Every structure is written in C-alpha cells, then in structure tokens.
Amino acid sequence: MKRTAACLISLSVFAALTNVAAAANASNGQTLAKRWCATCHVVAADQKSGSTQASPFSAIAGKPGFDEHKLAFFLLDPHPRMPDMNLSRSEAADLAAYIGSQK
Ligand code: HEC
C-alpha cells in the first residue's frame, strides 16, 4: 500500500514538472503575437511595419539582460502605454518564449 502511494506521489510530481517544462510554447506564442501584438509591434521578420513607438520583438530580445522569465512577468503586469491584454500566465510564458526565440 505504502509503495503504491509513494509511486502515485512521484508520478504526480513528475507530471507537474513536465507541465512546467511544456508551459512555454514558442509556436503558440507566435500565434498569439500575430493576433494580439502585431498591430503595434513588428513580431516577425516577414512583417513589414508596426507602430513607430513600439519596439520590434527582435529588438526587445536583443536587449542586454533580456530574460524570458522577467518578460513573462512584465507581460502579466498591464503596461501604461499598452492595452491590458489580460494574458494568462501560460500565454505570457508562450509570448516570452517566442520573443526569446528571436535573439
Ligand atoms: C496598442 C499598441 C500595442 C499593442 C497591441 C502591444 N503593444 Fe507592446 N508596447 C507598445 C508600446 C507603445 C510600447 C512602448 C511603451 C513604453 O516605452 O513605455 C510597448 C512596449 C512593449 C514591451 C517593452 C519593450 C521594451 O523595450 O522594454 C514589450 C515586451 C511589449 N510591448 C510586448 C508586447 C506584447 C507581447 C504584445 C501582445 C500581447 C504587445 N506588446 C501588444 C504598444 C503595444
């Protein structure tokens, strides 16, 4: 009985860990970026232009000290000059992973 319980616990810990690893999905981030961010930001190399005030995602990724985790948190916090996107944690992580992939 004890062994079964221990086994179940380690299985659920394993499931939780793989969930975290699978949480950031750059290709889903790309879909989200094209849908929600492309009106202002240049989100991909094949995009011609965005708003002049918003940095292209490749420039954001190229900043010194760029950190995907910090970016994901930044995206959850409504930004003064950006509309509040109401992103979920996993959407923010996916977007950050996508932006990070443009380094
Ligand atoms: C309505 C236009 C608009 C939309 C839509 C928009 N942004 Fe922005 N974003 C801006 C502007 C303008 C700035 C610059 C803000 C500033 O300098 O204070 C900015 C800044 C940022 C920054 C910080 C850049 C830096 O240099 O530190 C990030 C990251 C960012 N946006 C990500 C996103 C993501 C991801 C989305 C889509 C979910 C998005 N934005 C959608 C206008 C927009």
Image (spheres, grey):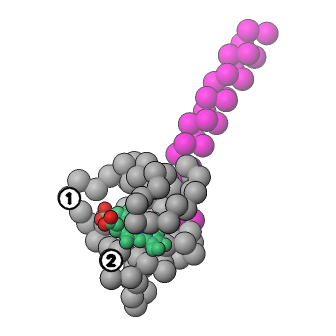
Residue at screen point 40% across, 84% down: 50
For label 1, the residue is 64
Q: Quadrant of the C terminus?
A: bottom left
The amino acid on which the numbered mark 1 sits, given as a three-letter code, is: Pro
The one of 94 and 36 positioned closer to us in this rendering = 36
Residue at screen point 56% across, 69% down: 32
94 left or right, relative to 46: right
Whether 28 is drawn above or below 93: the answer is below
Pair 2/1: label in front = 2
Are dots 2 and 1 in contact, CB under 8 Å?
no
For label 2, the residue is 53
Residue 37 at what x, y percent from top left? 49, 73
Q: Is residue 44 magenta?
A: no
Which segment did they paint magenta? Answer: 1-30
Could one spot residue 20 in this view of the protein? yes
Regarding mark 1 in the picture, which secondary structure is present there? loop
46 left or right, relative to 18: left
In primary-sequence order, the first of circles 2 and 1 is 2
Residue 3 at what x, y percent from top left? 72, 13
The one of 42 and 16 positioned closer to us in this rendering = 42
Question: Image quarter for residue 98?
Answer: bottom left
Could one spot residue 26 in this view of the protein? no
The one of 72 and 84 positioned closer to us in this rendering = 84
Q: Which numbered circle lies on residue 4?
A: none
Q: Is residue 12 magenta?
A: yes
Tally of numbered tags: 2
